[in-house]
Image (spheres, rainbow, N blue to C red):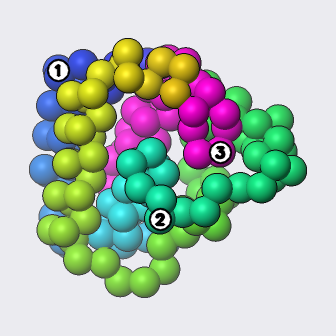
Amino acid sequence: MKNIFTKEVTNEVIGRIEKLTAESQPNWGKMSVAQMLAHCCVTYEMVYTDKHPKPNAFAKFMLKMIVKKIVTSEKPYSKNGRTASQFLITDEKVFESEKQRLIDFINKTQQLGEKEFDGKESHSFGKLTKDEWNNMFYKHLDHHLTQFGV
């Protein structure tokens, strides 16, 4: 898996994002390109903001037991997979605003670096290794950028 914490990979991902336009259409799924960008921002919102409530103890236990491996492994996501409710974006979004928000989150994460994330508590899964954080960040971005053909 590519390392999103390196400047080289961050620049590559941002270059792919820059190829998107407000008219970009998905190869699968129902989200518009602006909704997809907002959807990708949710992962970072859970790291950097208090916008999303933390799951209760039971829900966090279930997430760790069932979802964590899917999200943090190197195995790619399948097309049209199920999405957690806080990641569902159904309202209209402004393409340029969401694009810039996502780029800013990606840059901030790269600048903080993998040492900042090694052993850091995640919103839903407890403490993760730097590799688990990397897989979660990179795999999700790659999945949706591929969805939109970039």
Q: SS of the residue at dot 3?
A: loop
Q: Which mark is residue 8?
A: 1
Where is residue 130 drawn, in percent x and y? 47, 18
Q: Residue at x 38, y 42 (%)?
A: 141
Camera-nearest residue between 37 and 76? 37
Q: Which residues are magenta?
A: 121-150
Cα–Cα span, label 3 and label 2 = 14 Å
Left/right placement of residue 43 relative to residue 22 reads: right
Q: Residue at x 55, y 69 (%)?
A: 88
Nearest to the eye among marks 3 and 1: give it: 3
Q: Main secondary structure of the magenta part?
A: helix
Q: SS of the residue at dot 2?
A: loop
Asked which quadrant contains residue 137, the reply is top left
User: What amino acid is labelled 2 in the image?
Assistant: Lys
As displayed, is residue 3 above or below residue 127? above
* Residue for badge 2: 51
User: What amino acid is labelled 3 in the image?
Assistant: Ser
Nearest to the eye among marks 2 and 1: give it: 2
